[in-house]
Amino acid sequence: MARYKDEQCRICRREGQKLFLKGSRCYTDKCSISRRNYAPGQNGQKKKKLSEYGTQLREKQKTKAYYGVSEKQFRKYFEMALTEKGITGEVLLQILESRLDNVVYRLGFGSSRAQSRMLITHGAFEVNGQKVDIPSYLVKAGDVISVREIRKDNGTIKANVEENIARPVPAWLEKDAEKLSGKVVRLAEREEIDLPVEEHLIVELYSK
């Protein structure tokens, strides 16, 4: 499945809540949810009652959009979660949080996950001293993520660090703003993931 390339704000409006897909814009009055808090389209303001399947599907679509992954990737992560110990839905979110593009965003080096993906593919980051340009790379506890030496003068990254200096970093990560690096202390726990989703509905959807 191709990556969604239409207006990102339409996704948030369809889900009826902010998914923070456009970085700093989402924190301002320019956010579409603040101005038009209803679904896009001609019939967007009409209330629709979803079926059980529809509710489960919306949770899955919301989660995919939040992390910016395709259906094929999402299904792969779900199958990975099935093989791990623990509650499948929570393990699924833990895996998604472990993606390098999400970690770069959580550390404040990218203004959004989409921008973080772009910076990674352009070779701006390294993991444990080795260049990694794959946004879907899954980090592990103990990994150190750093801006590469030749990219430390990157204006976009510098601006993001300054703008996000007060943005809290999750407890499962450590950040060194001066060295433009961060460390994965441990994998994320469910209560530390701020995604407003009922992951058990996704498990029910795939279990049919």
Image (cartoon, grey):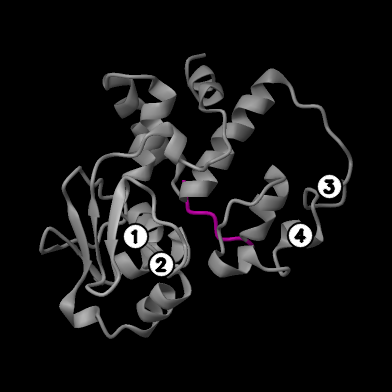
Taking the image as shown, residue 177 lies to the left or right of residue 159, namely left
Please tell me the numbered disc located at residue 110: 2
In this view of the protein, which residue sits in the foreground, 25 or 189? 189
Question: Which numbered disc, 1 or 3, marks the residue that appears first in the sequence?
Answer: 3
Asked if residue 4 is among those painted magenta in the image, a careful observer would answer: yes
Q: CA distance from mark 1 to mark 2?
A: 6 Å
Asked if residue 127 is among those painted magenta in the image, a careful observer would answer: no
Question: Which numbered disc, 2 or 3, marks the residue that appears first in the sequence?
Answer: 3
In this view of the protein, which residue sits in the foreground, 169 or 202? 169
Taking the image as shown, residue 64 lies to the left or right of residue 119, namely right
* Range shown magenta: 1-7
Residue at position x 25%, y 45% from top?
138
Few, some or many residues within 10 Å of mark 3 (<14, 14–19, 20+): few
Question: Which numbered disc, 1 or 2, marks the residue that appears first in the sequence?
Answer: 1
Q: Which residue is mark 1?
A: 104
- Nearer to us of marks 4 and 3 is 4
Locate residue 204, reporting x and y percent. Answer: 53, 17
Q: CA distance from mark 1 to mark 3?
A: 34 Å
Please tell me the numbered disc located at residue 44: 3
Cβ–Cβ below 8 Å for labels 1 and 2? yes
Locate residue 55, reporting x and y percent. Answer: 67, 27
Q: Amino acid at mark 3?
A: Gly
Q: Amino acid at mark 1?
A: Val
Few, some or many residues within 10 Å of mark 4 (<14, 14–19, 20+): some
Q: Is residue 64 above or below residue 124?
A: above
In this view of the protein, which residue sits in the foreground, 151 or 144? 144
Q: Secondary structure at mark 4?
A: helix
Q: Secondary structure at mark 1?
A: helix
Please tell me the numbered disc located at residue 34: 4
